[in-house]
Image (tube, helix red, strand yellow):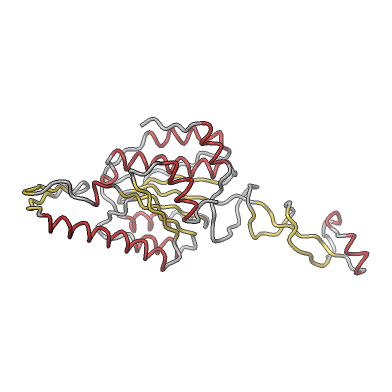
Amino acid sequence: MALRFEDDFLKKLEYLHVVSKRAFAGQSRADRLAPKRGAGMEFADHRGYSRGDDFRHIDWKAYKRLNRLLLRLFDEEQDLPIYILLDTSKSMAQPEKFDQALRITAALCYIGLSHLDRVTMVPFTAKLGEETSPGTGKGRIFRVFEMLEKLQASGTTNLRASVNEFASRGHRRGLVAVISDFLDEEGCEKGLKVLRTLGHDVFAVHLVAEADRDTSSYGDVRFVDAETGEQRDIEVTPQLAAAYHEAWQAHTHGIEQFCGRYDIGYVRADAERPFEEIILQAFRQGRFLA
């Protein structure tokens, strides 16, 4: 799929920013506030003047009122580390699902780049793929498009193993968005909990496709596991199809409940839902973007 966004949609994205429930100290100046006190643009507090302090930051109006030398402190604007863990396993290979995941990844990258945040894309299956950081500034979005267009869905999913590898690389704490269908034989919960334990602000973007949740055929059907190739012949009756749908709903609802219990952001991104609607509505309602 050739990834491109219309200019008017890009302008809409520029008005959005990624919302982190935590504040992280960044490395370079950016369009957000971090808890580190410094010489930024937004006033934060006063403290007493000490020998060696920059006298240019003395609040002379306060001195006239209080007869004390006070230094003006500012919240320093810094970049937010944003890590996008993109599931590229075989279960994501359905064109509508994988294309949706790629578009969401590109949109989040563009929003981060527009605000000079430090964005890192990390594809994963049962292990991490090659990390890529396009740089800063919205002009880098074309590099993001090129990198995403090269990705292919293959292999099995193991979020916990991938997260353990991610943890071993010693990343700075930041916001981690996991974009996946969460069809993980070992479950996704342990991997998400590890990210929280590492001190990251974690957000789960749950890709759901109609083909995953509903059986479209009845009678003797051969089911093939998309990732392992395991086959199973089953007679699908209306009762069995209804039970499967109910189990699928319980599975997806369980992931959402788990995220809420552990203060992990959650957004469901249906593959058949209009992409712009997901970004401009669902992500804002999920308090991931503002």
Q: How many marks?
A: 0
Taking the image as shown, residue 30 lies to the left or right of residue 71, namely left
The x, y position of residue 250, in whole percent, is 27, 62
Instruction: State whether residue 96 is above or below residue 42.
Output: above
Taking the image as shown, residue 99 lies to the left or right of residue 55, namely left
Please name the residue shown 51% across and 50% down the image: 82
Give the position of the N terminus as an image quadrant: top left
The x, y position of residue 269, in whole percent, is 38, 49
Instruction: State whether residue 284 is above or below residue 195.
Output: above
Between 85 and 243, the one nearer to me in the picture: 243
Instruction: State whether residue 104 is above or below residue 187.
Output: above
The x, y position of residue 192, in whole percent, is 39, 60
Taking the image as shown, residue 43 lies to the left or right of residue 143, namely right
Taking the image as shown, residue 155 lies to the left or right of residue 130, namely left
Q: Quadrant of residue 159?
A: bottom left
Please name the residue shown 88% across and 65% down the image: 69
The residue lying furthest to the front in this view is 238
Between 2 and 148, the one nearer to me in the picture: 2
